[in-house]
Image (cartoon, rainbow, N blue to C red):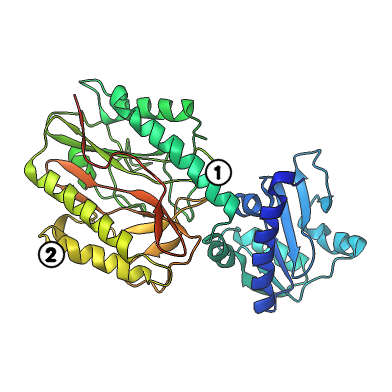
Amino acid sequence: MIAEELYDDLQIRWGKLQEYMAQTATGGCLLSADVNLYYMTGKVYNGYLYISQIGEPWFFVKRPEGLEGDGVIYIRKPEDFPSLFAEYGISMPKKILMEADELSHTDYMRLHAAFGRPDVGNATAAMRELRSVKTPWEIEQFRISAEKHALTYSEIPECYQPGMTDLDFQAEIERRMRKNGSMGLFRTFGANMDIHMGSILAGDNAEHPSPFDFALGGAGINDSLPIGANGTELKEGMAVMVDMAGNYTPYITDMTRVYSIGELPDIAYRAHKVALAIQEEIELMAQPGVLCSELYNRALDIAEEEGLGEYFMGTKQQAKFVGHGIGLQINELPILTPRSWEKLKPGMVFALEPKFVIPGVGAVGIENSYLVTETGLEKLTIFEEDIIRLD
């Protein structure tokens, strides 16, 4: 069931959860969401993972057939848990963690009843907190994604042809992504956060507000998916922001670069330089123990000091964050918001994305992925950061 090369790293993850359970007097944790199953097992399957406060995990599998290994038990329905626990000598917990923010109400109530209605803690919140600090193996996966991410971005100028729309351009970039190893999907946390492989924002479409909680919006193709490219024709004097996923391993790097169709107005280049200045300032400030709110507030201060506050993180709708954790999902912890009480910790990986939207031109700015180390930040996504001209 567990790949041998992952076993040592998975033990770190199990240990983190068991330490949390000991601190909260919790007897067991039941997980079933794909992201949490993968994090704890290195595999997505249909079923459940059960971890007691002490001991090895148990893998309760519905599908696929044929999984084998220590602790693998096939289960047909949640109501089988009491008899299976008794058969294998597993104690029923008096308090259990369940994925309150990911299970449907029906599944939550059914599982709660199957375990005899014990006290319940929120496994979703616990897992998001635990996943925010990465293990050595996870960090290596980010490095692999970052390298392939940069390779694809280096090929973007080859994707451009005069007369294209933003959708044509994105399709060519997506083809390069898949050829370079992209999984073709990236995961998000939370409801109503649909998007496919990333976002291209050209010209005034960058101003279009979206209901989704991403940094910038875009109208999308129609009202069923109101985000990103919308068929805008790429024309002279237009900025094209490329924010495509680095999903070349299960661990997603996040990187944004700006391309121009010909020359842009001076204000666009000035705003882009301010975004780079914000990035440089945050790189110096971001140390273990620093509040994420301090990083956001300093970014906003710089934008306002430069007279660009009205364009910062949007115009018609301004995002109230300038960075976010990344991992198995694109929007993990921590989040760089004005009121966050989260502090940076060594092992966290986050994306920093100071951006500006210039009416009549488009979006400019930067986004890179960073690892928090004991002494500061390590930039993972290494690629040209100035505006790249497309001809």
The image quadrant of residue 26 is bottom right
Q: Nearer the viewer, residue 119 or 378?
A: 378
The kind of residue on which mark 2 rests is Glu
Where in the figure is residue 281, as x and y percent of width and height? 26, 61
The kind of residue on which mark 1 rests is Pro
Q: CA distance from mark 2 to mark 1?
A: 39 Å
* Residue 352 visible in image: yes
Q: Which residue is depicted at the point 30% across and 49% down?
A: 210
Where in the figure is residue 4, as x and y percent of width and height? 74, 45
Q: Residues within 10 Å of mark 1 (few under 14, many from 20)?
A: many
Vertically, is 375 above or below 43?
Answer: below
Dot 1: element: loop
Q: Are marks 2 and 1 in contact (CB under 8 Å)?
A: no
State the residue position of label 2: 305
Answer left or right for 229 relative to 73: left
The image quadrant of residue 288 is bottom left
The image quadrant of residue 164 is top left
* Residue 321 visible in image: no
The numbered disc on residue 250 is: 1
